[in-house]
Image: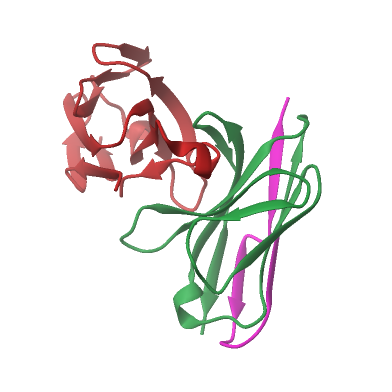
Chain colours: A red, B green
Amino acid sequence: EDQVTQSPEALRLQEGESSSLNCSYTVSGLRGLFWYRQDPGKGPEFLFTLYSAGEEKEKERLKATLTKKESFLHITAPKPEDSATYLCAVLPGDSGGGADGLTFGKGTHLIIQP
Amino acid sequence: SQTIHQWPATLVQPVGSPLSLECTVEGTSNPNLYWYRQAAGRGLQLLFYSVGIGQISSEVPQNLSASRPQDRQFILSSKKLLLSDSGFYLCAWGRVGKLFFGSGTQLSVL
């Protein structure tokens, strides 16, 4: 069974204090690993797709990296507007029966204090 | 550009009542469509997906059903709601894992 575990569940940082969020996964053949951002009461918003170990993607203060067993979302010098829940999801290689349906982790609730 | 509309935003329903949530997509043809549920303390759970009109697949056994009467319309229904159906329901379209979500419906069954 495909599993995605995110840690920590919640993280409180001061503005400018860099940190990393972790996503560990077990999946039968990884087609892709995805990061989403979700604001309270809204649908998730796509951030990154990573396809193979060693790959990195960047967007503003966020950088996502991927190994064979986990992914990290690094946040550099965060600002209060980066506060959100960050979701990790995997697309397994044998997802033909799920039409590309993702398996999501429970997310990390990030709070950046000014 | 593509947009996805989902309504209503919030809904409070008594146990045993019917349910109908609607989702429409604009700006794309023949999208893969998805219904997810997000319950408190749990991750997003895939409920249904559709690759075309009238084609519905269910990921988990449940009290809900889905229909796709038109290419860009996806409907989530129930004949009789249970307390356990409460949650945040999200419609999405996309391919190969890159999904675009609607704004969601917060359903409370009392």
Image check: A80 left or right of B70?
left
- Image quadrant of residue A59? top left
Q: In percent of the image, x 36 and y 53: which residue is there? A: B43
Q: Which region shows up in magenta?
A: B1-21
Q: Residue at x 51, y 37 (%)?
A: A96
Query: What quarter of the picture does the C terminus of chain A occupy?
Result: top left
Residue furthest toward the right? Answer: B70
Where residue B106 appears, as percent x and y from the top left, is 54, 64
Q: Nearer the viewer, residue A18 or A90?
A: A90
Taking depth in this image into account, of B40 and A33 the one nearest to the observer is A33
Residue A80 on image: x %, y %: 32, 34
Q: Taking B2 as reference, is B82 above or below it?
A: below
Asked whether, in this view, residue A102 is left or right of residue A71, the answer is: right
Is A23 positioned to the left or the right of A35 in the image?
left
Whether residue A81 is situated above or below residue B89 in the rendered picture: above
Measuring from the top left, give residue B96's x and y in whole percent: 52, 28
Give residue A37's position: percent from left, percent from top. 41, 36
Residue at 51% x, 85% y: name it.
B110
A108 magenta-colored = no
Residue A7 visible to the viewer: yes
